Amino acid sequence: MGIVDALVRISQYLPEIKNPVKEVSFKNKLLWTTAALVLFFIMGNIFVVGLDKTQGFGLDLGFAQTILASQIGTIITAGIGPIVMASIFLQLFVGAKLIDIDIGSPEGRAKFQALQKVLAVILCFVEAVVYINPGLLVPAGGISLFNPMFWAVFLQIALGSLVLLYLDEIVSKYGIGSGISLFIAAGVSGQLFWQIFRFPVGTIITQGGILWNLFAFGDLLGILPVIAVIIIFLVVVFAEGMHVNIPITMGHRGTGGRYPVKFMYVSNMPVILAMALFMNVRIWSSFVQNVPILGGIFDFFAWATMMPNIGNNQLFTAVSSGSGSLLQGIVIQGFTALTMNALIQGFVFLGLLIIACIIFGWFWVEMGGQSTEAVAKQLEKSGMQIPGFRKDRRVIEKVLNRYIPPITILGSIFVALLAGLGDFVLAGIASGTGILLTVGIIYRFYEEIAKSQADLLAPLLGKI
């Protein structure tokens, strides 16, 4: 018995959320989704017990917290990182043929999901150890295996990620959409709301939100990122509506129809996976920074997968920490602060992001049953065919190959550019990646709700 079969067998002993016995009503879906969301927010406000309060969080992971729905210092410090990284590792292993799994078959997908769950549970504990280092979290009494506070902090972070793992499973089976998407959208929305509407704290008036600074001090520059958020929102909504219609018919002389292939065919999952990978590179680089050779390699990749600080003054170097945006800085000082090092790092970052999104986009299409072969099988089973051609699955595949692979690549490049460029422009109130993901997630929530309502009104249409 190989390692893969052993891990699949282990998954049978892990706690599991049972599939619903009957169709879950729309009202109950809303209740389960709301309950998971409330619990997520509560966990995000419960701080880890046993941390050394004199030590700050040395590594800036602001943008990473958006992608991983995490809150450094709380019990959801690791967020959904273990779940996402488990998916990334398995996709890379399957793609490199290191693991022999036919993801096109139901049995292969079931085995993949079992492996992903086991690996996610393991990573909950592995990442809990990674977060406990001088660059992030330091337990009271220091980092030592003989320190009880080390194990207390370790267990809290690991168990927090385990709870999110099962909340994601609950939402996927009993709620609307997926828990991963729900938590990301909730985190981004909360951050955006706080940055715009927060009131000043104590006597430090400058800590007020964008609207407070606008009305109290006439800070017109502060409203620029908000305008950028609206523009990105409209661009994503417009892109979500773009699609190519492939003509199909039911039978040789049956009723004609169209099969739409959306421009956002890959959804926003490639960006989630790519940014999560980048974030983990940064965390692991801080963990192995003192290891010869390996530390240097990780330092390089951490530099290449990180948004650059633009310029040397406080306004630009504070971009990643949330006190200003590149857009505001350019309006104030022009392009003189764009150093050569920053430009090189920016192009490298965008290049790697595009490549990663294309790779993960292809995997996502294959895993999600949206590949050319999978769609052709679905259309053939439904009795569909391409008008003007004989009824043959190979013909359907040939026609679909003209659209699905190019759209997969173009869609992946589009979301990568929108997320990457948005991160440069919006740093200070949110991230382009976060806004992109949130808009896409909300759009899909809307589609899920619309589908649920259609199922209630027309059960037969719902089955089709």
Image (cartoon, grey):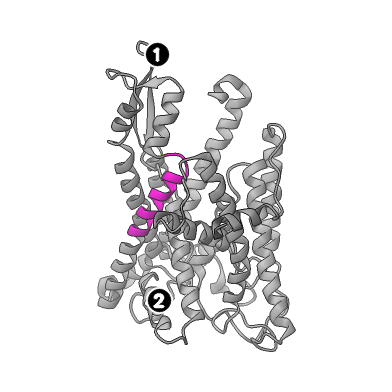
Q: Is residue 399 visible?
A: yes
Q: Position of residue 148 (x, y in %)?
A: 74, 83
Q: Mark on residue 401?
A: none
Amino acid beneath label 2: Leu
Q: Nearer the viewer, residue 339 or 127?
A: 127
Q: Nearer the viewer, residue 130 or 437?
A: 130
Q: What residue is shown at x 56% (from left), y 45% (from top)? A: 110
Asked if residue 407 lies left or right of residue 15, the reply is: left
Q: Position of residue 434 (x, y in %)?
A: 48, 57
Magenta residue check for 355: yes
Asked if residue 227 lies left or right of residue 49, the reply is: left
333 in relation to 54, above or below: above
Q: Position of residue 420 (x, y in %)?
A: 37, 60
Q: Position of residue 410 (x, y in %)?
A: 31, 47
Magenta residues? 354-370
Asked if residue 289 lies left or right of residue 50, the reply is: left
**Secondary structure of the magenta portion, mostly?**
helix
Amino acid beneath label 1: Thr
Q: Nearer the viewer, residue 430 or 159?
A: 159
Q: What residue is shown at x 46% (from left), y 24% (from top)? A: 381
315 in relation to 455, above or below: below
| Kind of element beneath mark 2 | helix
- Closer to the chain start, of discs 2 and 1, is 1
Q: Nearer the viewer, residue 322 or 221?
A: 322
Magenta residue check for 302: no
Q: Mark on residue 315?
A: 2
Q: Is residue 197 visible?
A: no
Q: Which residue is mark 1?
A: 255
